[in-house]
Amino acid sequence: MTKKLFLDTNIVIDIIDEARTHHAKAKETLIKIIQNDIEVYVSEDMISTVYYILRGNPKVLLFFKSILKEWRVVPFGNDVIEDAIVLCLKNGGDLEDTMQCLCAQKHGCSLLLTNDQSFAQCGMSVVTYEAFLKAV
């Protein structure tokens, strides 16, 4: 099993927001991550995106404060952004997904966890909750 897991923004929102359809799966996944001592990576832009989407939820800032101690919050950097733009111009696709995928690769993650069934492919394993939970 992977020891470096990159979380897409929608996974983090599922963890925080109890009203989300996948909240229970997100909690189960988080427990498995902790039990298996998996190193979690997220992009730093995820912080502002999640805050914007869930800004009325009082748990958001407390959640961010707690993950800063446990998770690796990493930047995209110019190289990732430039490579993502080139890939999107060449193949189409979602720029945000592509940047997250390339960022995960840059930081040595072997899996990217997302709910997005059409998440951009950039040469790494992209899995949903079900696939991740089967593998751990």
Image (spheres, grey):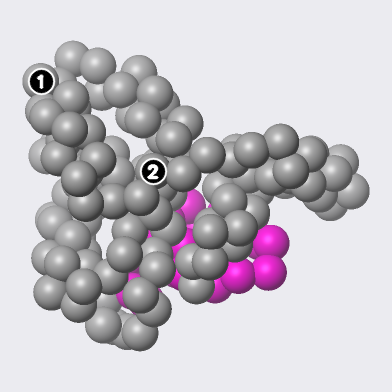
Give amino acid for label 1.
Answer: Pro
115 magenta-colored: yes
Considering the image in quadrants, where does the N terminus appear? bottom left
**Rendered image quadrant of residue 114:** bottom left
The residue pinned by badge 1 equals 58
**Rendered image quadrant of residue 26:** bottom left
The residue pinned by badge 2 equals 73
Residue located 33% across and 58% down the image? 40
Residue 47 in the figure: left or right of residue 87: left
Q: Give the range drawn in magenta.
A: 111-132
Residue 61 percent coordinates (x, y): 18, 25
Q: Earlier in the sequence, mark 1 or mark 2?
A: 1
Residue located 54% across and 72% down the image? 125
Q: What is the spatial separation of the Cα atoms under label 1 and label 2, in whole angstroms?
A: 21 Å
Furthest-top residue in view?
56
- Work out whether residue 20 can be spotted: no
Residue located 40% across and 68% down the image? 4
